[in-house]
Amino acid sequence: MKRILLVAAENGAHPGGQVGGVGDVIRDLPLALAAQGWESSVVTPAYGMFNKLPGARHLSSIEVGFAGATHTAALWEIPGTAPRVTHLAIEHPLLSPDGPRKIYCSDSPDRPFATDAGKFAFFSAAVATLVKQSGAPPDVIHLHDWHAALYLALREFDPAFRELQKIRTVYTVHNLAFQGIRPLANDESSLAAWFPELRVAPKIVTDPRYSDCINPMAAAIRLADKINTVSPSYAKEILRPNDPAHGFSGGEGLENDLRQAASQHRLTGILNGCEYPKFGRRPGWSSFLKATKDVLEGMDRAAGPAFHAETIQRLASFPQRRPGIILTSVGRLTAQKTALFLQPTTKGPSALETILENMGKSGVFIMLGSGDPQLEQRISEIAARHANFLFLCGFFEPLAQLLYRIGDLFLMPSSFEPCGISQMLAMRTGQPCIAHAVGGLKDTIQHNVTGLLFDGDTPAAQADNFVAITLHARQLKTDSPAQWQSMRKLAAAERFSWEVAAEQYEKELYESSGS
């Protein structure tokens, strides 16, 4: 039986263990690999919380060299329910510098990634030590995003870890927009501070734009045996440079490294999968209103009354009969996810406000999400001006599932999208999507079949086309009910299987013959 170790910052198998799509992959991919005969272990930081889950078991101690000292970290096994899948977590105070239960930390704009970069540098060193000390190392190491990337630099340049070069090591890019860039030296959060004895080749670890900085993601792309992104289209898009004037997000400064990897046949794109549970009847509108009110009141008690009191009042003003069309959106509020909502159209107002104004009383838009405080504020201000817009600031999984099931049309105008999971979750409940024709959105939505796609040569043109296709969808639902129902059924019938994805991972990444 072949064995694999997956290394990541998130694990959706644990309560509170994920922030984004990485957690979904780390939860679901090992199960699909187990079905194909692989024995999978997953390791993340414990963040002062996973080791306290019921049934967690201390396995051993790990002596980790970091920042000029030796630190004792604890290895824990976290209970799981699947055979051939083991969940591990490494605990040490350096892995929860802002206190427990926090996966990512926020730093000031003048020190981006400073806290997290040190945290994940220590994590990479701990994982390298763990693998080195293992009596039976895995056949494959699978690293995810920049948080695990420095493992490859240690494997390459630290004599203590040179034996790890014998283990096939692959690297998944989930989102190129986050690379973990920090100074090479002269900072408490720098390569020299983390590993003062490490002698590296600058051309391997430095950022292509900032010669005095280390770029963990760039180093991993240069050193991994195989690299993949989480959709075929994104794997092609990142070979081109960013072009903001034309609204295009590409290689984020790493396009030359990625083209080099592609020319060496080390780069591929494999679409993420999705789970497909059975759903009951679609909830009625009145049931949805009551359930949402109950959730909001619960969130209100936990988080303070000011914002949610206003939101509950807005909810109470919604029509008691189901509106003509219900638009929904679920996701983190980041520039990637929200820029096109807020992008001014060629006529002036933002795409979001134009959609709301044209929809009038015939429909409602319900958005669930949180993230950038400035984006939260801007969207809250728009919600205050439009009675047909309910902004639920925060995240609560049962409420997200309600929105996926109640909505008629899911809006996902991401500026770029490595894969995306929200569109799959909406489609599986029979909710067609309006989406920007980029990355994984283009790979999962068939235009005019399972949803509707738009594009454009500039951000303003993209905003115009986003508005136009959304209003067209509203009209399609009203004027062509048979076509609309067909789109709903075809969206629900789509299957993006983890089993298929796992087969591709095995063939294209894990097997030496795939080189």
Image (tube, rainbow, N blue to C red):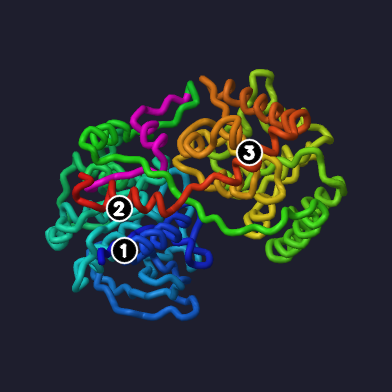
Is residue 122 toward the left or the right of residue 416 in the image? left
Q: Nearer the viewer, mark 1 or mark 3?
A: 1
Is residue 238 toward the left or the right of residue 360 in the image? left
Residue 177 x, y percent position in the rendering? 42, 40
Residue occupied by mark 1: 38
Q: Is residue 103 magenta?
A: no
Crowding at mark 2 (Cα within 10 Å: few <14, some 14-19, many 20+)? some
Residue occupied by mark 2: 506
Q: CB under 8 Å between callouts 1 and 2?
A: yes
Distance, label 2 to label 3, CA atoms, is 34 Å
Distance, label 1 to label 2, CA atoms, is 10 Å
Q: Name the residue type under label 3.
A: Leu
Q: Which residues are magenta?
A: 224-244
Q: Nearer the viewer, residue 231 or 176?
A: 231
Q: Name the residue type under label 2.
A: Glu
From what the image shows, is residue 343 above or below residue 34?
above
Crowding at mark 3 (Cα within 10 Å: few <14, some 14-19, many 20+)? many
Is residue 427 toward the left or the right of residue 505 in the image? right
Residue 198 x, y percent position in the rendering? 17, 55
- Write the residue at 58% across / 46% down: 493
Crowding at mark 1 (Cα within 10 Å: few <14, some 14-19, many 20+)? some
From what the image shows, is residue 455 above or below residue 310?
above
Judged from the image, the secondary structure of the residue bearing numbered disc 1 is: loop
